[in-house]
Image (cartoon, rainbow, N blue to C red):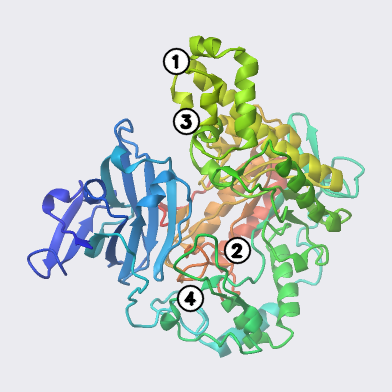
Amino acid sequence: MRKLEIAPKLLTEGAQLLRQEGPAQGEGKRYLLRAAKEGAGICTPWLMDGKERYFTLMLKAQETHSVALNLLLYGKESGDQPVMTVRFGILPQVETMVYFDMEWLDGHVLFPESIPGELKIVCHGSRISRNEITRAELKTLPAFHDLSIWMSELAMCDELSEEFRLPEGKLVDALGQNKTKEWPGKTRNLDDLKEILQEQMKTEPKDGYPFGDWSSYGGWKEKKLGEGTGFFTKYKENGRWWLADPDGYAFFSAGPDCVGLSAGARVDGVEKWLDWLPDQEDPAYAAMFAPPRKREGERRRNPVMFSFLQANLYRALGEDWYEKWKRMMVGQLKRYGMNTLGNWSDERLFGVTDIPYVTSLPDFPDTEKKIFRDFPDVLSPEYAQNAEKCAQALEKRREDPWMIGYFLRNEPSWAFVDNLVLADEVLRNPEKTVCRQELAAFLRERYGSIEALNARWGTALDSFARFDEPQEKVSAWSQAACLDMKEFSRRLLRAYVEIPAKACRRVDPNHMILGMRWAWISDPDLVSGWENFDVFSINCYAQDPTSNIENIVKLGVDLPVMIGEFHFGALDAGPSATGLEGVRTQKDRGIAYRYYCERVAAHPNGVGCHYFQCYDQFVLGRFDGENYNIGLFDVCSRPYPEMMEQVRACGQGLYPVAAGEREPAEEKAQEIPMIAY
């Protein structure tokens, strides 16, 4: 292990070294840094001048909220933009070990595994080799105030210790709430919880929606688009896209994702921070744990998940807690003007609770050999065969009128790299894939001879056999090479979409295919194959989604557009991070929700948006370390009243906005920079 020291010259602009403690020569020294609210930190030349695999350090944020940081890696030609960004989060006022693995630099992993006490890690951007790094900086993200952070025990090493020292203290109370913080609406104890939930059940609506012009499906009875097909479908009228419910009424899909009570609290390694955690063998609570799952390549942690949501309902409502929750939850969603169970909701609610839902294909077709990250060998017979197998899962719901449609998958990790040229990855990957064979055949057919290809590309290849060997960034060889690589990439993208979509149509011709739920349109060619969908879907975290929807239209997609995810978080409740869009207060969360939804409805292609998510995330982090205040409800199943007031007002006015009879809401929330990872 090589101990490291922070010298003043290593500070980035906007950083101050407030204090040093410990020995004069490096070992054991602690540094208190002040980072300007614009974001600041330290330069880390050790990544470039060493051979060790890991960079490790201890961090402690002095703030009352979580802190997000970036490790920014720059190359010779990257200018002011980093080639790769490793983003991670740390809990407030808790000394945390963090680490960076140099093997992440090859871009193969998007979400590395965190260690106990550390929050989510994400590797954004493209790959970069260690010898290509010209500058490396560890910096805080922009915040709404200056940040103070202790740094200590900086080191480079080849072995990562399996023992992670966690400080003493209790951070989570017996109800799964943040124990270190107070806020309006915090549940005091189990008796308080029982009283609150019993009162909520008394106000449960008996039937239907609160708006007289809504159909039984949540459609708009003021606008009949057709006689009704018995299933949800799409219509285009006077340049405006609509969905229609099974009775033919105009339908705008609004509701939360993750309407369910999954084991959302990751507790392995952090048990000492919990006031209460039942034994996994206790019959009353055993089913509330998700068993450890050893993931491929996993060395450090076996995830153990627990549901404080279920435990709270059981302790407050008794043995029949689930049936009571089911009625209460669906009733509340309807009362607040929501008509859809979003993605990842509890399947036991589907088709039996009189509320429409969307779902996803349980498994997306895969192949043993990958091109890049999770992109399969899409031109192989294996991919087509697996597409047929995956599509069979739709059989059980093909006659369900409550199902709006299904997404093929969610946020492929390969598409997180902006302007990725998939054909480049085919040739870089040493695997002997069918995609590689077909790419070589594509080039032979196009040029006939290697001499003709060389003349066009400006290269000096000796034969087409060169494409049987790994090649680096072929699209950068020349403009002509780039055009060919991009064209073949579009062929791969179309196959990626079209093969499973056609297999699904054969099994279920009744329901709409809702697209891929792209995290964002990271390359214009990502829309390739859109004709195979009924609805084009993206996840869009923004204050105003209009430009994101309009971008899809400008790329030539003539389909209704659905937003699969969006959210807003604040810091005046239990969880200590905002998520991907930050606002000041719970009231601002509601204002932002309404502003967003009504702008989706106002767009000629907007037909729905699903809020991520129904419940807050666990204060210490869910399975991947996210710990955001983004729920409509908290861990005690209590709605956030100031937010939900705006949600209901939004639902009441959505259809007049969509029809152009009313302008969307103009009031904007007070924003703050996100705290997210």
Callout 3: SS: loop
Callout 1: SS: loop
Query: For residue 631, which quarter of the picture?
Result: bottom right
Mark pair 2, 1: CA separation: 65 Å
Which residue type carries mark 2?
Met
Task: Pick whichever of labels 1 and 4 is earlier in the sequence.
Answer: 4
Q: Which residue is mark 4?
A: 268
Callout 4: SS: loop
Residue 204 visible in the snapshot? no
**Quadrant including the N terminus:** bottom left
Task: Pick whichever of labels 1 and 3 is earlier in the sequence.
Answer: 1
Foreground disc of the pair 3, 2: 3
Q: Which residue is mark 1?
A: 460
Which residue type carries mark 1?
Ala
Q: Residue at x 29, y 61 (%)?
A: 56
Q: Are marks 2 and 1 in contact (CB under 8 Å)?
A: no
Q: Nearer the viewer, residue 211 or 388?
A: 388
Q: Nearer the viewer, residue 190 or 100?
A: 100
Residue ranking furthest to the right: 227
Q: Which residue is mark 2?
A: 644
User: On residue 666, which mark appears?
Assistant: none
Q: Residue at x 74, y 50 (%)?
A: 406
Which residue type carries mark 3?
Gln
Which residue type carries mark 4?
Asp
Foreground disc of the pair 2, 1: 1
Q: Report x, y in % for residue 22.
A: 12, 70
**Residue 524 versus residue 122 in the image, above or below:** above
